[in-house]
Amino acid sequence: MKKSDKMIGAGIALAAIAAAATYFLTGKRGKENKEKIAAWTLKMKGEVLENMKKLKELNKENYLALVDEVAIRYERAERVGAAEMKHLTDELKGAWAHISKQLK
């Protein structure tokens, strides 16, 4: 793979990560989310974003697996209710539609 192809791929991945961050905080419910979000939810979303950078290939399967992995860890560590965790996990998984548009 040429260096220019790697740079283009990195740029696309960075755009997708930025799109995910924007969606999480300024999406349709961004204002509402900011008011209701507890500190742990921001940390969890941040961890998902950080780990997205480490994925070798950013695709739906890898992204959904990443969200599940982070959710399991936070559910154990943060004493989060099952309903609240399900809501956040569904929101993060639903963000794939927005992220995938940025990859194209």
Image: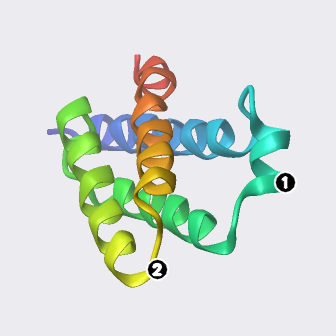
Which image quadrant for residue 46?
Answer: bottom right
Q: Nearer the viewer, residue 3 or 44?
A: 44
65 is higher (above) or lower (below) than 79: above
Q: Which residue is mark 2?
A: 78
Which of the marked residues, 2 or 1, is nearer the chain's N terminus? 1
Location of residue 83 in the rendering, given as x and y in whole percent from the top left corner: 46, 51
- Of residues 19 and 94, the one nearer the viewer is 94
Say what secondary structure mark 2 lies in.
loop
Disc 1 is placed on an element classified as helix
Task: Name the residue that disc number 1 marks.
Answer: 35
Q: Residues within 10 Å of mark 2 (few under 14, many from 20)?
A: few
What residue is rendered at 37% in x and 57% in y? 53
Q: Which corner quadrant of the image does residue 59 belong to?
A: top left
Comparing 8 with 33, the one in front is 33
Report the residue at 58% width, 63% height from top.
Answer: 41
Three-letter amino acid code at the position of disc 2: Glu
For residue 11, side relative to residue 53 (left or right): right
